[in-house]
Amino acid sequence: MAVKRVGIKEFKDRATQLLASGEPLVVERHGKTIGYYTPIKAPDPVALREAQNAFNEKMEEVARKLGISVEALEDELFGAPPQEVAEENTNASLSAGRL
């Protein structure tokens, strides 16, 4: 993909059109590069939703095989939220008679 070179004045005057073109830009002032614009591709919402659904199905399958809830599996994989950790520590201390 060719990179388009534009002067700062042209960039200022036509920024909306230049950025909408979706092509990479090199912005120059007096022939010297002062900046780059590299467009990103927005994720395909359909593909993203399909990936999320596949992930959720796999989480449910693994949780079912382990005989635990999806929430318990998430806590094991990603760590319990801070509130739950604090509550578990309090409950453990109460059970041990430490509070």
Image: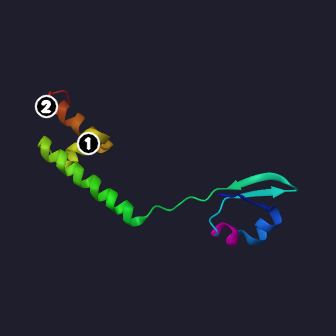
Highlighted magenta segment, given as a residue range: 16-20
Spatial CA span between label 2 and label 1: 22 Å
Quadrant containing the C terminus in the rendered view: top left
93 displayed left or right of 47:
left
For disc 2, the neighbor class at 10 Å (few under 14, some 14 to 19, many from 20) is few
Q: Whole-percent x and y of residue 97?
A: 15, 27
Q: Amino acid at mark 2?
A: Ser
Query: At which x and y percent is residue 26?
Result: 74, 56
Determine whether, in the image, residue 52 is placed left or right of residue 19. left
| Disc marking residue 15 | none
Q: Nearer the N terminus, badge 2 or badge 1?
A: 1
| Mark 2, secondary structure of its residue | helix
Closer to viewer: mark 2 or mark 1: 1
- For disc 1, the neighbor class at 10 Å (few under 14, some 14 to 19, many from 20) is some
What's the residue at 19%, 45% (across, down)? 62
Q: Which residue is mark 2?
A: 95
Residue at point 50%, 62% (across, down)? 42
Amino acid type of disc 1? Asp
